[in-house]
Image: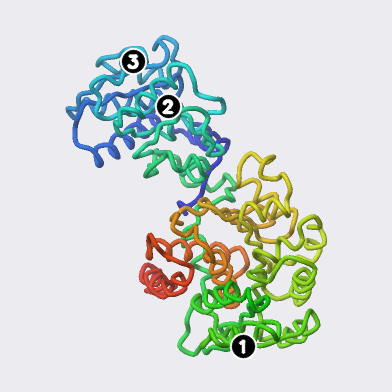
Amino acid sequence: MTQEILNIAQMGEADRRAIEGGAPGVDLMEAAGRGCAEALCARWRPRPVAVLCGPGNNGGDGFVIARLLKERGWDVRVSCLVPVSKLKGDAAHMAALWEGELSPLTLDSLLGARLVVDAVFGAGLSKPVGGIVGDVFRACAASGVPVMAVDVPSGVDGASGKIRGPAPIAELTVTFARKKIGHMLMPGRARCGEVVVVDIGIPADVIAGLAIDVFENTPLLWRSRFPEICMEGHKYNRGHVVAVSGGPSHTGAARLAARGALRAGAGLVTVACPKASLLVNAAHLTTEMVQAFDGPLGLDEMLQDRRKNAIVIGPGCGVGARTASLVRTVLRAQCAAVLDADALTSFAGAPQTLFELMHDRVVLTPHEGEFERLFAGLIRQAPHRLEAARQAAGESGAVIVLKGPDTVIAAPGGRAAINANAPPFLATAGSGDVLAGIITGLAAQGMPAFEAASAGVWLHGEAGNLLGRGLIAEDLPQALPRVLQELAVRAPGGRV
């Protein structure tokens, strides 16, 4: 299970336990430096390289990298932020093994370099980078010389992904044991480039004992709960989604959600709409059914058919008391539900009246603006988006999908996933409506809320990657069959 994401305290605890268990710290540092050197050599051919070392263990890793590159015939020059006499422990030991050129860290450290190894500060950085380090990395950025970062680019806070000074934009970042939060959350993720995780000898039981509850959102996280397509199956046991539509001039969003649900595998999908919208929806739909209802009582009557087991509400519904009343009706039905867009904004200023109706099959899918309307000030107050989403999940009792380039999926119990496969092309009108529908379609087939949300976000991202630049929301459901087929091919036995 290598999709676990560690916070800084957990990584420190893993190092401590490994050393207590008999793995010398110097051996862990040697393995870290060797992993960095091997990743570097796999990407670049020999060239003049400037290795920039800091005052702690990250600097010690840099000295190991320099020594191993020199042994392979590279032209290596090392610069250190502090005199080596001030280094301590394993870092001092590794510095003593370096027999090549060594100088203080200055702007001259970059002269002639065609590759920079950033081993100045590691993931534990918690204060702004300035002084000569800032000057060096500004000059590095201006030069265009490629950078390989050790652990994280210096200036990226590994605990939050925040930028604390002129952090370099690395082409390659090599980290140890597992990825850290700063590798996954923006804007830090954008500074890391490709992230390679190397094994430095921390035993698997040490990692397992850390009670990790944050993961990178990959199929490993939810594949065991993904709906199977059985030979004896039929449309009625693959769930029936209801997509609630708004008035006649705002019907497109619900249809996008409906098509997303259908392409995600739901057996049947009905677009439920006011009578005034019936003909508009019917004119646009072929595979999805259309059914009219009259207000909350009409929707409640429709949902008495328990075969209709998953509902998506919000896209195009309109903001106001009518939508809020429909949402209450949906939640009282106790079936799987995805609340998006107007279904969330209709409770701005009175979120507790929404939260008191929550149950364990509800997913909320806000972007940051909608999140702020329900959880005022939480993003600003929390240390990062991950923690904001986790607090929101705990407060609301629902699974939260906090959308963005680093979408976070969080469950009320604290489990969370960070998504990293979504391209910027998904920032287009209607994309979120399709996502809400995909999640609902998976929930209709029996996936638990957290797994359905995580899988839906990943599938949505993969569809965006497949389509590329120029995609529009209508394209996303059309791309899902290929994404699902590729997922099936990668699964054991060719099944998802």
User: Which is nearer the N-term, disc 1 or disc 3?
Assistant: 3
What colour scheme does the image use? rainbow
Q: Where's residue 492, x and y in %? A: 39, 69
Q: Quadrant of the C terminus?
A: bottom left
Q: Where's residue 67, x and y in %? A: 27, 24
The tally of labels here is: 3
Check disc 3: other Cα within 10 Å, few if <14, some if 14-19, many if 20+.
few
Tag 2: amino acid: Asn
Whether 65 is drawn above or below 462: the answer is: above
As measured in the structure, the alpha-carbon distance from the residue carrying label 1 to the one carrying label 3 is 80 Å
Whether 19 is drawn above or below 294: the answer is: above
User: Which is nearer the N-term, disc 2 or disc 1?
Assistant: 2
**Which residue is disc 3 drawn over?**
96
Determine if residue 447 is in view.
Answer: yes
Q: Is residue 359 left or right of residue 220?
A: right
Residue sitting at 47 percent across and 66 percent down? 459
**Which residue is disc 1 drawn over?**
279
Front in this rendered view, residue 349 or 463: 349
Whether 418 is drawn above or below 66: the answer is: below
Residue sitting at 28 percent across and 38 percent down? 38
The residue sitting at the front extreme is 249
Secondary structure of the residue carrying numbered label 1? helix
Tag 3: amino acid: Ala
**Which residue is disc 2 drawn over?**
58
Front in this rendered view, residue 167 or 495: 167
